[in-house]
Amino acid sequence: MSFITIQNVSHIYHAGEEQEHRALSEVSFSIEEGEFIAILGTNGSGKSTLARHINGLLLPSSGHVLVDSMDTQETENIWNIRREVGMVFQNPDNQIIAAVVEDDVAFGPENIGMEPGRIRKNVHEALETVGMTHFRSFAPHLLSGGQKQRVAIAGALAMQTKCLVLDEATAMLDPRGRQEVMETILRLHRENHITILLITHFMEEAVEADRILVLDKGEIFASGTPRDIFSRGKELEEIGLELPLASRVAEKLIQQGIPLPNTILTKEELRAELRQLQQAQ
């Protein structure tokens, strides 16, 4: 059975009221343990609503969300689900509650009654994993945005989470901060086999995923590998999305008669193709 299963999930805000809004409509998909999924969509497509269902912050109006066979609709499952699924949100300042970094990372394990010796071990390992050991005694307000998000990720890891859900976690960061966070996510996925669910509007981040889901008006518009999804440029454009920058540059060069493949996704691929053309001349 899949690690996470979304079964015909619909979510209606303000059901039965004048401002009723259907944010998700009969959404179904599954995530295997250790998989890296990126979810794309314009504002209002249902991305964040979906993210909040994965660890029970929101419950379906209809349908079911199963995490490691535990149904989020069953109240007795919620704490176990939240131990297995850690959330990292858009604004890092809204997630940090302690005056010292290592105390903040320890907050979650302490809150569930983890044994003190194990907490110390988990906090040390989590900070080491995200490259923040040097900052363990720092006040969080002295950290950059990217460093704060890495502390938030460490807090989830200290709970020994199996899955990280990142809801626009790089949206408020500068390019350096985004790079720090993405490098951390990719390392956790590749080396620690953490399941990643990345909600993002940065196409370059989605390229790194094993699989992309595209949401549109609360429904799954497309699902596939990054290369599959970004080969559908015109369809994506019709729902308000664009291709990664390297793909757009390659497209412009192709229009000018430069013989490049139309499958380029990253700047590294574009650079390699251009170098190969130069060497062939």
Image: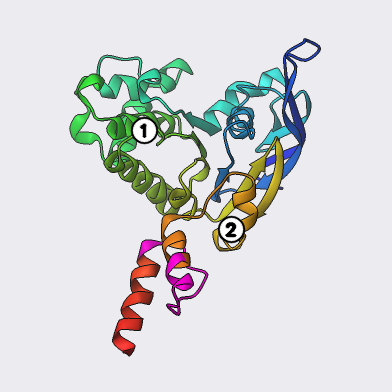
Q: Is residue 256 on the magenta stretch?
A: yes
Magenta range: 252-267
* Residue in view at x 73 percent, y 13 percent: 19
Compared with residue 249, is residue 33 higher up or lower down, i.e. above or below? above
Residue under numbered circle 1: 154
Nearest the eye: 179 or 137: 179
Question: Residue pushed farthest front?
Answer: 256
Q: How would you rate the neighbour count of disc 2 (Cα within 10 Å): few for under 14, some for 14-19, many for 20 or more?
A: some
Which residue type carries mark 2? Gly
**Residue 206's x, y, as percent?**
49, 50
Say whether residue 224 is visible.
Answer: no
Is 78 left, or right, of 125 in this rendering?
Answer: right
Compared with residue 279, is residue 263 higher up or lower down, i.e. above or below? above
Give the CA separation, mark 2 to mark 1. Answer: 36 Å
Say whether residue 132 is visible.
Answer: yes
Nearest the eye: 279 or 195: 279
Is 111 left, or right, of 176 in this rendering?
Answer: right
Q: Earlier in the sequence, mark 2 or mark 1?
A: 1
Q: Is residue 187 on the magenta stretch?
A: no
**Residue 50's x, y, as percent?**
63, 32
Q: Main secondary structure of the magenta part?
A: loop
